[in-house]
Amino acid sequence: MRLHRNLVYTTIDSLNAIFNEGEYADKVVARALKKDKRWGSSDRKFVAETIYEIVRWKRLYAEIAEVKEPYDRDNLWRMFAVWAVLRGYPIPDWRQLEGTPERKIKGRFDELSKNRALKESIPDWMDELGVKELGEKVWAKEIAAQNQPAKVILRTNTLKGTKESLRNTLMDLNIETEYLKDQPEALVLKERANVFLTDAFKQGLFEVQDANSQLVAGFLDVKPGMRVVDTCAGAGGKTLHMASLMENKGQLIAMDLYESKLKQLKLRAKRNGAFNIEYRIIDSTKVIKKLHEKADRVLIDAPCSGLGVLKRNPDSKWKLQPEFIDNIRKVQSEVLESYSKIVKPGGKLVYATCSVLPSENQEQVEKFLKTEIGKQFTFIEDRKMLASESGFDGFYMALLERKK
C-alpha cells in the first residue's frame, strides 16, 4: 500500500477546484477520472474515493492540520497528510509531505473527535438544526450514517427486461449484484464499478437510483393509461420509473423550471425506451393553470435542503447555508399549494423530499392541509426514511387524496 505521485497530484488539484473555486465534487471527480487513460480501475478508485473522503471530512481534517480557508496548496497537502496518516499509509519522502507529524495527527484526531460537529465534520449550525428538529439521539445516529459512503443501487428498467435478466447480463461483465428485500426493481452492487461505461447502461437496461428514491413512484400508485404529472421532474429519475410502471401507456407530463434539465431527461428517456412522456417548461403560471383538476396522479418531488443525501453529496455540507433552508421552506409551501390544484377529484398526490427535517416534511403537509386547497385533500399515509435505519438515503413522502 503506497502512494503514487500522479494520483495524489490529481487529488490535490481536484480539492483545490472544490474548496477554492466552488466547483461541484461529482463534476470534478468525473473530470479527474478522465485525466490519464493508462490508469487502471484501482487508480481511478483511489482518486475518486480519496477526493470524496477529504471533502466529507474537510472540517475535521482542517482542524487537525491547523489550516484555515481559503486553503493554499500547502494547506491542501497538510490535509492530505492527515487523511494518509489516519488511513494508515506510509508517508513517502516527498518534499510536500516532509515533517508530517504522525503522532500529533493521531492525538489531535482522538481529542477533536469528542466534539460531534468536528467528529462528524459538519458546520455548527447544521448540528444545532439537526438536534433541534430530530432530537439529540436520532440526529447523532443520522449524521453518522450520512457520513458513510453511499452504496451503488441500480433500478431495472422493466420496459426493457427483468431484474433477473439484468443481474445475469451484469454477471457476464464481472459486475456482481444482490437483490434487495421488498424492492421489486433494485439491484445493489457488491463492489463499486463504473456501470455507466457498460453496454447494459447504454442500452437503457437500468438507471442508477437510490433504494429509497425507488419507493416514491410505487407509493404514488401509478397505473398504465393514467394521466400523471411530475411537477419537479429535474433530470427525471422518478419520471422514468413512472414511465416503466405505466408500461408506456397513458400520458406522463414532466415539468420543470429549467429547460436544461428536461433536455437531459429527453436523452435518458430515449435510452430507456420511454415514449409516453411530454415535456413542459414552467415559464409562467398558465402552464399550471391549464392542468388544473386534470391529473389522476401528481408527484411533487419538492426542492429541499438535501439533508437526506449528504452521503451522496458530501460537498453540500459546505455549500448549504441556513438562509437557504429558510427560503426553501417557503418555496415548498408555495409549490404544494400551487401544484396540488392539478390533481382531479378522486386523484392522488405525493409530496416528497430528500430531507430528514420535519420542518420540510410532515410539518409542510400539516400546514398545507389547513389551507383552502389543502382542505380538499385527505391525508392517507406518509413514510419517513432515515439513513440510520435503512442504510440508504434519507427520504420523506406523503400520500394525499383529493376528495371527490
Image (cartoon, rainbow, N blue to C red):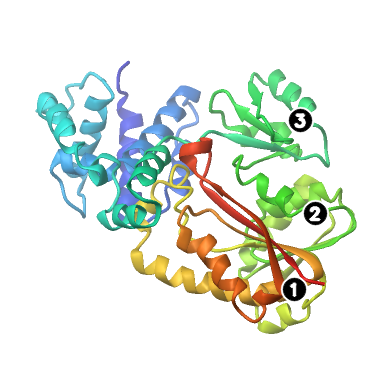
Report, in whole angstroms, how far the alpha carbon at label 3 lies from the one at label 1.
34 Å
Residue 27 appears in the figure: yes
Q: Residue 207 appears at what percent x and percent y?
A: 68, 41
In the image, residue 145 sits, relative to residue 273, either above or below, namely above
Residue 34 seen in the current view: no
Q: Secondary structure at mark 1?
A: helix
Q: Crowding near pointer 1: few (<14 within 10 Å), some, many (20+)? A: many
Nearest the eye: 15 or 155? 155
The N terminus - image quarter: top left
In the picture, measured across the screen, residue 404 lies left or right of residue 263, that is right
Element assignment for label 3: helix
Residue that label 1 marks: 342
**Circle nearer the viewer, 3 or 2:** 2
Q: Residue at x 62, y 46 (%)?
A: 213
Residue under label 3, please give it: 163
Q: CA distance from mark 3 to mark 2?
A: 20 Å
Which is nearer the N-term, disc 3 or disc 2?
Answer: 3
Seen at 32% across and 44% down, the residue is 15
- The one nearer the camera, 101 or 366, is 366
Q: Which amino acid, mark 3?
A: Lys
Left or right: residue 124 compared with residue 226: left
Q: Residue at the spot x=42%, y=35% of the render?
A: 148
